[in-house]
Image (cartoon, rainbow, N blue to C red):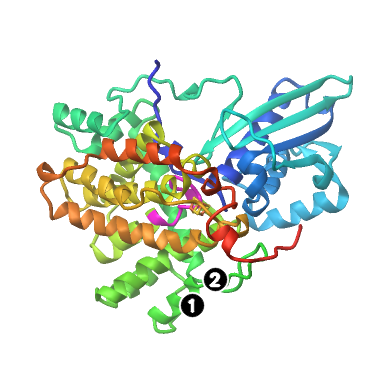
Amino acid sequence: MPHEAISVFDIFKIGVGPSSSHTLGPWRAAQRFIDGFYQKEQLFNIQSVRVLLYGSLAKTGKGHGTDIAVQMGLAGQDPVTVDVNSVEARIADIRAMKKLLLHGLHEIDFDPQEDIDFLVTESLPFHPNALSFLAILNDGQQVAETYYSVGGGFVVKEGEALNGKHAIQLPFPIDKADDILHWCRTTGLGISEVVMENENSWRPESETREGMLKIWQVMKECCFRGCHTHGMLPGGLNVTRRAADLNRKLINGRDYKNFDEWIKAIRDGGSDFKYTLDWVSCFALAVNEENASFGRVVTAPTNGAAGVIPAVLHYFIVFCNGNNNDRILQFMLTAAEIGSIFKKGATISAAMGGCQAEIGVSSAMAAAGLTEAMGGSQRQALMAAEIAMEHHLGLTCDPIGGLVQIPCIERNTMGAIKAITASQLALQSTPDFAKVSLDTVIKTMWDTARDMSFKYKETAEGGLAVNIPISLPEC
Ligand code: SF4
C-alpha cells in the first residue's frame, strides 16, 4: 500500500464556516467539477448543471450551507479568498435571477430550488457525505461526476485513490503514534521537528513557517472578530452570540481595536482560575460563532471543532507566556500530526464517527500541541492526546435543526478545557505508568464509531436534535 502523507496544510485549512465536511468539502468538489470543464476548454459547452446531495449532506445540508457552498464553487469562487460578506448577496442574486455564472465566466439557467436535490432517503455506499454533479452539454452529451466529502474539507472523487496526491515519500512516514515515537527516538528530534522534516519534502521550511503563521493570523483575526461581534446567529434558531458580551464583561467594558493591546489587557487581568476559564470559553465561543455565521475560519481539523485549537493557543499566549512564534509553530505542527493519525487510524468525519471525530480529535490535537509547546516530552504529548480523546469517546453528533450551533458552539469550550486539563495531567505524570496508549484509544474511537447508530452521525435524527422542538423557516 502506498503511504498516505498528510501535510499540516491538509489539516489546517483556511475556509468559510459552518462545516468542513458539509460546506468546505462540497465547495471544493464543485470547484473541481467546473474547473475540469474549464481546463478542457469545454466550459462554454455547458447548457445546464444539476447537483444531487446524498446521505448526511442531504439531511443536514441546509443547516450546514451545502447548497450555498456548491453554488459558490460552481461560480468559481474560492473559499480562501472570497469576501465572506459577499456570499449572502451572491446567493440571493442567483436565487432571484435563476442564473449562475459558471467559473465566473459562463452564464447558465440555474434555479437552486429545482437544480439542487436533497435526496434525504438515499445514500451512496462509500461514504455518507456524497454529492453528484450532472452537466448537460450543448450537443446533448451528459457528464456526471460523484465526489465524497470525507471530513475536514478533504474531498475524494469517485474512482480516485483515497490518498491520491498525498502519495509522496516522506523521510519519516507516520501512520500511528508508535511511528512518531520511533522517529523521535531514532533521530533525537522532538515531535514538531520530525513533522517539520516531513513538511520539508513538500516545500522549503521558510514557506511552511510563513504559511503556518498566516493560518495563526487567520485564527487570531477570527477570535478577535468573534469577541467583538454582537447579535443573532443566522439560520432561524434565534441563538444569541455570547462571546462579545462575555468579552466586554471580562474586560470591564473597555474597547480595544488592536489585537495586541487586547491580549495585553487580558493578560494584565491576572490568572485567577475562574478568570482563565472564562477567557478560554470566550475564545472558543468567538470562533464558533464566527463559524456559524459563514465567517472566515481555519478548519482544525474540522469547522464544527474550529474553536478548540485557537482557544487553547490563545490560552497559551495569554496565560502561559507563550507569545513566541517558534513555540506556536511547535504547537501547531504537533497538533497537525495528531489530527493526521486520527484521520488514518479512525476518522475526522462526524458523518462516520459522531462528534468524537470532531471535538474529540481537535481536543486531542490541542492537548498534544500544548504539551509539546510547554516543554513536555514526546511521550507526555502523546499521553495528553490519549487522555483528551479517552474522555470524548462515544460523543454523538446531534446538531439541532442541522445547524452547527447547538450543541456545537459550547462543545468547543468543553473540548478546549479538556485539552488543557489533559495536557496538565500528562505534564504531571510519568507516561511509563499509563495503561492506555494513544494508538489504543484511536482504535477504540474507530470501534465506537462503527458501533454508533447512524442517528448520531450528523443526520440530526437523534439526541438533542429530536428532543428540542423547533421550526425552522424553509429557505
Ligand atoms: S455536534 Fe459536533 S460533530 Fe456534530 S455538527 Fe456539531 S460540532 Fe460537528
Can you tell which quarter of the image residue 117 is in?
top right
Q: Position of residue 427 (x, y in %)?
A: 16, 53
Is residue 304 within the magenta segment?
yes
Q: How many marks?
A: 2
Query: Is residue 326 at all visible to an observer of this figure?
Result: no
How far, Cα to Cα, is label 2 from label 1? 8 Å
Query: Is residue 65 at all visible to an observer of this figure?
Result: yes
Question: Under tag 1, what secondary structure?
Answer: helix
Q: Position of residue 267 (x, y in %)?
A: 29, 72
Residue at 35%, 31% in the rendered image: 199
Q: Nearer the viewer, residue 260 or 188?
A: 188
Question: Under tag 2, what secondary structure?
Answer: loop
Q: Nearer the viewer, residue 297 or 324?
A: 297
Q: Nearer the viewer, residue 462 or 242?
A: 462
Is residue 447 within the magenta segment?
no
Determine crowd level at label 1: few under 14, some 14-19, many 20+ residues with C-alpha closer than 10 A.
some
Q: Which residues are magenta?
A: 298-308
Residue at 74%, 63% in the rendered image: 473
Q: Nearer the viewer, residue 105 or 166?
A: 166
Q: Position of residue 230 (x, y in %)?
A: 56, 74
Which residue lies under the disc numbered 1? 245
Disc 2 marks a residue whose amino acid type is: Arg
Answer yes or no: do the residues labelled 2 and 1 have beta carbons within 8 Å?
Answer: yes
Which residue lies under the disc numbered 2? 241
Q: Position of residue 216 (x, y in %)?
A: 40, 51
Q: Compared to 389, does 187 lie above or below?
A: above
The rendered magenta stretch, by its main secondary structure, is classed as loop
Residue at 38%, 49% in the rendered image: 360
Given the current orientation, which residue lies at the most extreme right position?
139
Determine crowd level at label 2: few under 14, some 14-19, many 20+ residues with C-alpha closer than 10 A.
many
